[in-house]
Image (tube, rainbow, N blue to C red):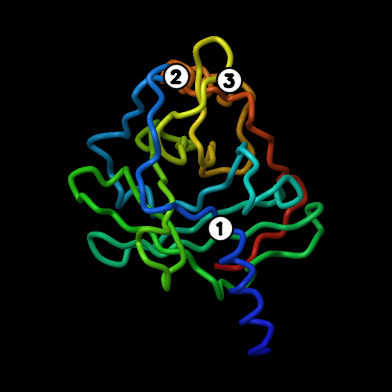
Amino acid sequence: MKLFKTSLVALLVMTLPFRSGKAAKVNSKCKTLRTLVPFNLTMYVTHEWYSIEQKPTSFQPRRDMFCVRANYTLEGEKSISIWNTATRDGVSGAVRNAEGLFKLRGIIEDPDVNSKILVGLPFLPLSMYEPYWIVAGDLDKGGTKWAFISGGPLSTPRSFGLCEPSGGLWLLASDPFVSENLIREIKSRVRDLGIDCSALVRVQHRGCDYPTL
């Protein structure tokens, strides 16, 4: 069991997209991306969040885009514990991180801008963490809550004057089943921010059996 845990940690370390310690470059052809301010982080972490669509990355490729869920727990003013789960190769596939043995840590460098977070493994230096920017969302309305996350500033120009960050993109909701109208509305809003949504892939949730929190 100890060897298994050691191997899994090594795999996580190898597959996480590490920063070089330098801030991501901002492309002058892209819009300047700002996070939500003010932002109610306390309300945000009270919800379970389901990934509705997201951009494939080296640490979460297409084969892991089933039953993707995130749970957040505040651990003080500047720290968040993050438990991510998903299944591989289908909704009935192997559950990744089912017991929550490997949790990520979120660090808020400026409490006045608590929608701008750095995320990484707890034992790694902050210079190796990745940006997690909450750039749009609706936590106040009744019914389904949603949030849109960018993995840092926009840096890669795409079509129609839109851009992508070097990191991921996530459309999250408090319900795994949201209407197509809401998805279109969210994408329209984030395109107005200059974000290209064409790389987003739909996450499958129908038939999922999520780990007990």
**Residue 186 seen in this snapshot:** no
- In the displayed image of the protein, which residue is found farthest to the left? 112
1 or 3: tag closer to the N-terminus: 1
Please determine whether, in this image, residue 142 is positioned above or below residue 208: above
At x 23% / y 43%, what residue is drawn?
113
Could you tell me residue 145's position as x and y percent? 46, 38
Amino acid type of the residue that numbered disc 3 sits on in the rendered structure: Arg
Q: Secondary structure at mark 2?
A: loop
Task: Tell me which numbered mark, 2 or 1, is placed earlier along the sequence.
Answer: 1
* Real-space CA distance between mark 1 and mark 3, rounded to the nearest whole angstrom: 30 Å
Q: Observer-nearest residue: 169 or 204? A: 169
Q: CA distance from mark 2 to mark 1?
A: 26 Å
- Front in this rendered view, residue 188 or 109: 109
Q: Residue furthest bottom?
A: 2
> Could you tell whether 34 is left or right of 56 in the image?
left
**Where does label 2 land, which residue?**
194
Label 3: element kind: helix
Residue at the limit of the structure toward the top, as seen here: 160
Can you identify the residue that label 3 sits on? 184
Type of amino acid under label 1: Leu
Q: Which mark is residue 16?
A: 1
Label 2 CA crowd tier, 10 Å (few <14, some 14–19, many 20+): some
Front disc: 1 or 3: 1
* Amino acid at pointer 2: Gly
Above or below 10: residue 77: above
Where is residue 201? Give x, y as percent: 68, 35
Label of residue 137 in the image: none
